Image (cartoon, grey):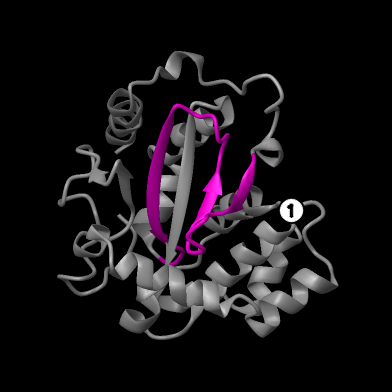
Amino acid sequence: MLVKHAIRAVAVATVLGLSLAACGPRTGYATDADIPESLGADGTSIVVGDESAGTTVRLFEDLRCPFCEEFETQGAGTELNKLTQKGSVQVHYTLASFLDDRLGGNGSKKAANALRAALAKGKFVEYHQVLYAHQPDEAVDGFTDEFLLKMASRVEGLRGPGFDAAVKTMKYQGFVAASEKAYEDSSASAIGTPTLELSGVELPEFERGYLAHYTRQPARTARP
């Protein structure tokens, strides 16, 4: 399993034409907290990374998806983060929430809303990593307000009256709905999450046998 993850990590860099040998933080990017982040011009994506980066990728994720958790914590997502830190790649995240309809509950929507609230405080990258590092099982619908606020306490400077209220009231539900529609309207919806695109083309290292085909098969409720 670890070999597979390593191969996929190298494949990401190879397809992007980048080198993992120099993936340490670039000058000025000492931590994830220093990576630029903003709301995309389309209003449905969250943009992470330097605008002068030579490569732009689009990443579709559902926070309840166990394959997304595997990608972010054990797979090529860790290398993608290093390349973003270095300033070589800019990532456009589209946060889907289709698993709520498939499995029941509203955890995906709540998590996406909380991440949008974190973006408003410049803490998306850090909070995104924390949520995946402590992702509840997809069948549990564990992204409750209480859980999201507890996880937010792990990110320095994130908690506060404004953020807490945004989580509890679903302040950014318009963004959440628009992001899900953007996912549904994309080619990624025919494959599942995570899907990584370069210039609108899915990268070849993500085979259909690896991704969760929630649009074609019953939702997976156990981690690999």
Which amino acid type corresponds to the residue marked 1 in the rendered image? Val
For residue 141, above or below residue 76: below
Query: Which residue sits at x=56%, y=38%?
Result: 49
Query: Which residue sits at x=40%, y=17%?
Result: 19
Q: Nearer the viewer, residue 224 or 175?
A: 175
Query: Which residue sits at x=70%, y=27%?
Result: 30
Q: Is residue 8 visible?
A: yes
Q: Quarter holding the N terminus?
A: top left
Q: Quarter holding the C terminus?
A: bottom left
Q: Is residue 64 left or right of residue 184?
A: right
The quadrant holding residue 206 is top left
- Residue 50 within the segment the image draws in magenta: yes
Residue 184's x, y, as percent?
30, 70
Write down the region rendered in magenta. 36-64
Q: Is residue 142 visible?
A: no
The residue identified by callout 1 is 155
Query: Which residue sits at x=54%, y=78%?
Result: 174
